Amino acid sequence: MSTITLSVSTVKPLGERVFVKVSESEEKTAGGILLPDTAKEKPQVGEVAATGPGKRNDDGSHVQMEVKVGDKVLYSKYAGTDIKLGGDEYVLLAEKDILAIVN
């Protein structure tokens, strides 16, 4: 999957999309072994940075999103589009690709 690099100040997702800031991947294993960049797995946890207005009903009204800005979420491994904004990594994904809100 390719990464898109943007040079904008804000991103506002449309529909039922969610913009998630990716958490840093682990630098060490549980046993203390340092991992090189090539061996690190893509993180599946991040913080919601922005949400769209939600899915539309048949009558045109929006269904409220289940996640909100600031929620820490677990999402599907190969879901969404990877985006680099400034020096930070984000993923833009559909709300259905979010598996859980974590603490």
Image: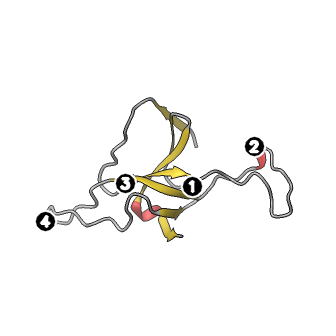
Lower position in the chain sequence, tag 3 or tag 4: 3
Identify the amino acid type marked 3.
Answer: Arg
Q: Is residue 7 above or below residue 26?
A: above
Lower position in the chain sequence, tag 2 or tag 4: 2
Pointer 2: what residue? 37
Pointer 4: what residue? 59
Which marked residue is nearer to the observer: mark 2 or mark 1? 2
Mark 2 neighbour class, 10 Å CA radius: few under 14, some 14 to 19, many 20 or more = few
Q: Label 1 to label 4, Cα distance in Å?
A: 33 Å
Lower position in the chain sequence, tag 3 or tag 1: 3
Q: Residue at x 36, y 68 (%)?
A: 66
Q: Label 2 to label 4, Cα distance in Å?
A: 49 Å
Q: Residue furthest top?
A: 7
Q: Quadrant of residue 3?
A: top right
Label 3 element class: strand
- Indicate the quadrant containing the N terminus: top left, top right, bottom left or bottom right: top right
Q: Nearer the viewer, residue 72 or 36?
A: 72
Q: Is residue 43 left or right of residue 68?
A: right
Pointer 1: what residue? 78
Q: Label 2 to label 3, Cα distance in Å?
A: 29 Å
Residue 79, given in percent of the width and then of the height, sits at: 52, 55
Identify the amino acid type marked 1.
Answer: Tyr
Mark 1 neighbour class, 10 Å CA radius: few under 14, some 14 to 19, many 20 or more = few
Lower position in the chain sequence, tag 1 or tag 4: 4
Which marked residue is nearer to the observer: mark 2 or mark 4? 2
- Indicate the quadrant containing the C terminus: top left, top right, bottom left or bottom right: bottom right
Q: Do labels 1 and 4 touch, CB within 8 Å?
A: no
Q: Residue at x 30, y 49 (%)?
A: 14
Lower position in the chain sequence, tag 2 or tag 3: 3
Q: Residue at x 40, y 61 (%)?
A: 95
Q: Is residue 26 left or right of residue 76?
A: right
